[in-house]
Amino acid sequence: MPTETLAAEFPPNVPGASVFSGPTRETMLRALVAAQPLLAGLAVTIVQLALAVWLLAPEGPLSYRYSTLVQHDSYWFANIIDRGYQTIVPPISHKAMEISNVAFFPAYPLFGGLLHRVGLDTYDALLVTAQAATWAFWSYFFLFCRRWAVSPALQFFGTLSILAHPAAFFLIAAYSESLFLMALVGFVYWSGSDSRAARIWAALHGVILSATRIVGIPCAAFPVVDRVFAGGWKTLCNPRQWFRAYAAPLSLTIVATVGAILFFIYCQLRWGRWDIYMLTQSAGWAIVPDYLAVFRPSSYRWHIPPLNDPTAMSQLSVTFAALIFSAIATIEFVAALRRDTNWRARIGIYFCAAVIFYISVSGVASVEMESMLRYHFAVHALIVLALLHFLRQFPTPPVYVRAFGMAAISLTAVAGLTLQGWYVWNFTRGNWVA
């Protein structure tokens, strides 16, 4: 919103308006406009926390209700903070954090450990880290909306679509979901600018991205994928232009993988095995990658599972994701045939979503798709972001089309939030949900 429009809301004849007159008033208005994405992100984060802690957590003091967001994997992160990485070689053949805890990438426990060292309890440090990252993620979401000039209505329903995902509450739990999404969306955001400061910020987010989860390594290729499609076949087929066109994005991709590379170097120097993380996942979690899983019909389940069967729900999420990818590909193709939809600007985001989906399915196929619902959430958030970019370029549809769309999203959101409420209720009481 232009400064002049905001200024009109504070006419000089209003009592007290002189306090905000002149350059100071203009500076305050500009600061307010600049801070809108951050304030919106903070508001959404607070709403998520309020729903989980005040409405769904077990009865008890507020501090206790808040602490129930620490469950399951959270204890492993806390163990890493308190004891550091510890393992025998080869890793123990079952889950035992006191013996082998090198089953998680280091970024999340590292940031949590920094807060722990300044005085926070370990669990509180993990929660504050996750929720600060949640705020940053939502801030980037609204920054993208401002960059793309997304209408307020689309912003609202986009936000609702992400919030209503059954696994969205993991953003505010003591898990690494929020840090991973914050780093990924921030990496994509800053990669879209060519200024020196933006490249530095992109590199920092990229390092955090690859140090948070192993799937962050291929996602670091976003700048290269984005530049390849932005330049088109003409640049790709001309080797003389490769260095000028691709040197900067390729350098950013390489730098972004440093987080994971440093972790692997640490493992090699300490235990003589750079792949001790993979070995621990295989030994303790029975993770045996199946890179053809996404192509197997048996990976997709079609029946509606009972609420108390989170594994079956994770299996169903694989089917939903595949259907959504197919629908988006069809819509993008048909729309591109009829008009210029700037589809190349979204290919990088779709690439990251597809990579996360593919590697996640490949990893958990050996354990009946356990936790896939949680991994699907990152895919879902990226797809919603890309769809906002797609939809904002079209003129306002007729009233009946808008009414149908809003009703469909609202009904889906009600179903998703209801399911999420069930999961939060169980999660905060120590039950496994994803």
Image (cartoon, grey):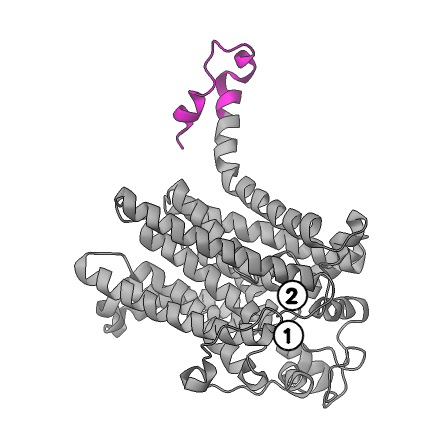
* First to last magenta residue range: 1-26
The picture places residue 137, in percent across and down from the top left corner, at 54, 53
| Vertical relation: 107 (above or below) 312 | above
Q: Earlier in the sequence, mark 1 or mark 2?
A: 2
Q: Nearer the viewer, residue 111 or 420?
A: 420
Name the residue beneath numbered marker 2. Answer: 107
Mark 1 to mark 2 CA distance (whole Å): 10 Å
Residue type, label 1: Phe
Disc 1 is placed on an element classified as helix
221 in magenta: no
Q: Is residue 63 visible?
A: yes
Q: Give the numbered dot on residue 263.
A: 1
Image quadrant containing the C terminus: bottom right
Q: Nearer the viewer, residue 174 or 108?
A: 174
Q: Is residue 174 visible?
A: no
Image quadrant containing the N terminus: top left
Q: Residue at x 79, y 57 (%)?
A: 117
Write down the quadrant of residue 308 in the picture. bottom right
Write down the quadrant of residue 292 in the picture. bottom left
Q: Residue at x 35, y 53 (%)?
A: 389
